[in-house]
Amino acid sequence: MKKVFAILALTAAVSACTTAPTDTYEKRVDAERVRREAAVEKSVDRAPKWMNELPVSTSAVYANGSAVSQDLSMADYKAKLFAYGKICMAAGGKVSQQSKMFLMDNSDASYETSEVAIRGVCPDVDITGVETKEVKRVAEGTRFRSYVLVALPTGDANVLKKQKEQLKMQSQAAGRSRQAFEELNSVKSPAQ
């Protein structure tokens, strides 16, 4: 009976040693991991609803972005760039993918190497009229995290893009009218 208790006590001591870090440095590493996990969970909890569920509209395209920096303006700027990139991809961006795989197999062992490279390209998409709808900033340790929601109005709802297109058409019309009058002036009338 004493042997059973001694074995149980020894087993409990060994299992306690394997589950909890005993080394000072292991404790530090474990504490840092716990701190980082808590920071990530806090960021997720503080994220606005539109980071998970974008608003839906028939007259606008929405996108979100999030970034962190030690500078508040840089956090905002990076978050907006991420959101603009999403709008760009939604408006005709292209993604290409290349994969490589090598397999070797024999009776004793298998060996595999694989690579995947993905490239996103967003060709000159005009995002004139894009609006920052909402910005939420939170402290994340010693840095700032910015959550940004942007909207790109579409069709007649995009007043700035409409104005830009009208100015372009006016400029084209002015150039074309000049060209038309020059062509008319270069043609000699039959009375001459």
Image (cartoon, rainbow, N blue to C red):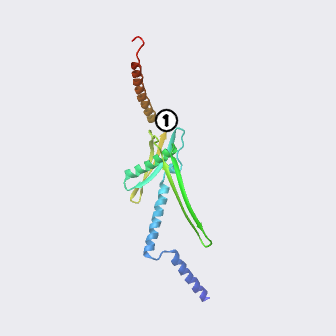
Quadrant (top left/top right/bottom left/bottom right) for the N terminus = bottom right
Front one among 169 and 70:
169
Residue 35 lies, in percent from the top left, at 45, 65
Q: Which residue is mark 1?
A: 157
The residue lying toward the viewer, choosing from 161 and 118, is 118
Taking the view exactly as shown, the residue that stands out farthest to the bottom is 2
**Secondary element at tag 1:** helix
Residue visible at 47% across and 66% down?
34
Question: Residue 191, position in %: x, y?
Answer: 41, 10
Quick one: 111 or 171, which is closer to the camera? 111
What residue do we see at 53% from left, 80% from top? 14
Q: Is residue 127 above or below residue 33?
A: above
Tell me the kind of residue under disc 1.
Answer: Ala
- Tell me the quarter of the picture where residue 188 sits: top left
Instruction: Indicate whether 105 appears above or below 188.
Output: below
Q: Furthest residue to the top?
A: 191
Q: Which quadrant does the C terminus fall into?
A: top left
Q: Is residue 63 above or below residue 113?
A: above
Position of residue 19 measured from the top left corner of the image (x, y, whole percent): 52, 74
Q: Which x, y percent locates residue 181?
A: 40, 21
Binning the other alpha carbons within 10 Å of mark 1 as few (below 14), some (14 to 19) or many (20 upward) gives some
Question: How many discs appear?
Answer: 1
